[in-house]
Amino acid sequence: MPINRIILYAHDVEATVRFYEKHFGFQACREAGDRIVELTPPDGGASLMVHPAAKGQRRGQSLVKLVFDVSDVEAFCERSAAEGLVFGAIHQADGYQFANAKDPSDNPISISSRAFRRG
């Protein structure tokens, strides 16, 4: 399963968006009411999803989450739990669902149906 999205937690979302637009040619996609700004690369590859950092997240520490696209978050969570990977609660966002877990080194990972939303 490919990684198509990487979440970057940013203390200054707009400065981060401008940086990736200017230096790497990413194009910003903003949706009303969504606090995530999705940056798509000019020639394909993984999108960057710039998300506001929590107050407790320090600058310079690793603030990245790997996001795996799945069409059915609930079904994936059930299959994963049977194999020993337990995700947290399933969250409903604007037209999609996601759930979070951690890898064996406590790095955050997420599964998301964002890529499959309609509209």
Image: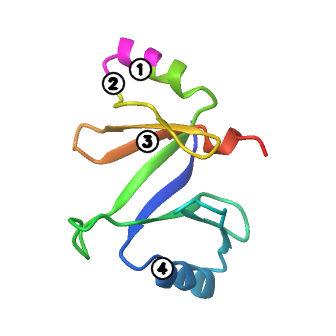
Secondary element at image label 4: helix
- The residue that mark 4 highlights is 16
- The residue that mark 2 highlights is 85
Sequence-wise first label, 1 or 2: 1
Where residue 110 appears, as percent x and y from the top left, is 43, 41
Q: Are marks 2 and 3 in contact (CB under 8 Å)?
A: no
- The residue that mark 3 highlights is 110
Crowding around mark 2 (Cα neighbors within 10 Å: few <14, some 14 to 19, many 20+) is some
Q: Which residues are magenta?
A: 78-85
- Residue drawn 53% across the image and 61% down it: 49
**Amino acid beneath label 3:** Ser
Sequence-wise first label, 3 or 1: 1
In the depicted view, which residue is nearer to us: 52 or 40? 52
Residue 48 horizontal side relative to residue 83, left or right: right
Q: Main secondary structure of the magenta part?
A: helix
- Mark 1–mark 2 Cα distance, whole angstroms, equals 5 Å
Sequence-wise first label, 2 or 3: 2
Q: Are marks 2 and 4 in contact (CB under 8 Å)?
A: no
Residue 36's label in the rendered image is: none
Q: Are marks 1 and 2 in contact (CB under 8 Å)?
A: yes
**Amino acid beneath label 4:** Thr
Residue 75 horizontal side relative to residue 52, left or right: right
- The residue that mark 1 highlights is 80
- Mark 1–mark 4 Cα distance, whole angstroms, equals 34 Å
